[in-house]
Amino acid sequence: MLAEIEQSLVAYLQASPLAARLRRIEALPDLDGESLVSKFGADAPAVYVAVGSGSMQDGMASITVGIACVARNSRSPQAARQGDGMQIGVLQLVHEVIKLIHDTYIEEFGYLVSGWDPVDSDALTRKGLYAAVVQARTEGYYGT
């Protein structure tokens, strides 16, 4: 179930009009530290999907999914955040992801966006990257 959620969200975003404005949409890679920052830099603008925390009650799972939005723009930090008409900025990217995901059914899962947070990272900022994570929640029966 969890892998299906991640894969279906990636496929949904890849098939959306937003995909034409991005270099990469995929599941969050199994990298950390400088390797992850380098990948973000090579792929930006990009979106990465990762299943997060979950809870269970009476066979129903409530699952949080994180959708990381990453942008860069060599013109300026403001252009990386807001976009410049040619490249999408991280704030535009967050807005578009929310519009695509909130109150949407993808396969048998309904999604509600519960928030978003900027990523405060010196390693990203040094590379001219700006990122934010959109959190969405879905629920479903967790069969055995």
Image (cartoon, rainbow, N blue to C red):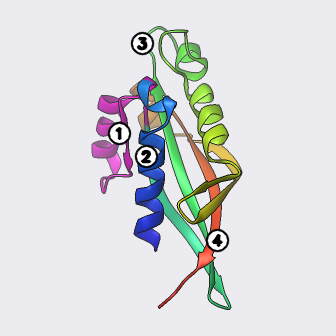
Q: Amino acid type of disc 1? A: Val
- The kind of secondary structure element at disc 3 is loop
Going from the N terminus, do you reach mark 1 or mark 2 first?
A: 1
Q: Which residue was labeled with disc 3?
A: 74
What is the CA distance from the residue labelled 3 to the residue labelled 4?
40 Å
Q: Which residue was labeled with disc 4?
A: 139
Q: Amino acid type of disc 3? A: Ser
What is the CA distance from the residue labelled 2 to the residue labelled 4?
21 Å
- Circle 1/circle 2 CB separation < 8 Å: no
Going from the N terminus, do you reach mark 1 or mark 4 first?
A: 1
Q: Position of residue 55 (x, y in %)?
A: 63, 79
Q: Which residue was labeled with disc 2?
A: 48
Going from the N terminus, do you reach mark 3 or mark 1 first?
A: 1
Q: Is residue 129 visible?
A: no
Going from the N terminus, do you reach mark 2 or mark 3 first?
A: 2
What is the CA distance from the residue labelled 1 to the residue labelled 2?
13 Å
- The kind of secondary structure element at disc 1 is helix
Q: Amino acid type of disc 4? A: Glu
Q: Position of residue 141 (x, y in %)?
A: 59, 81
Q: Which residue was labeled with disc 1?
A: 37
- The kind of secondary structure element at disc 4 is strand
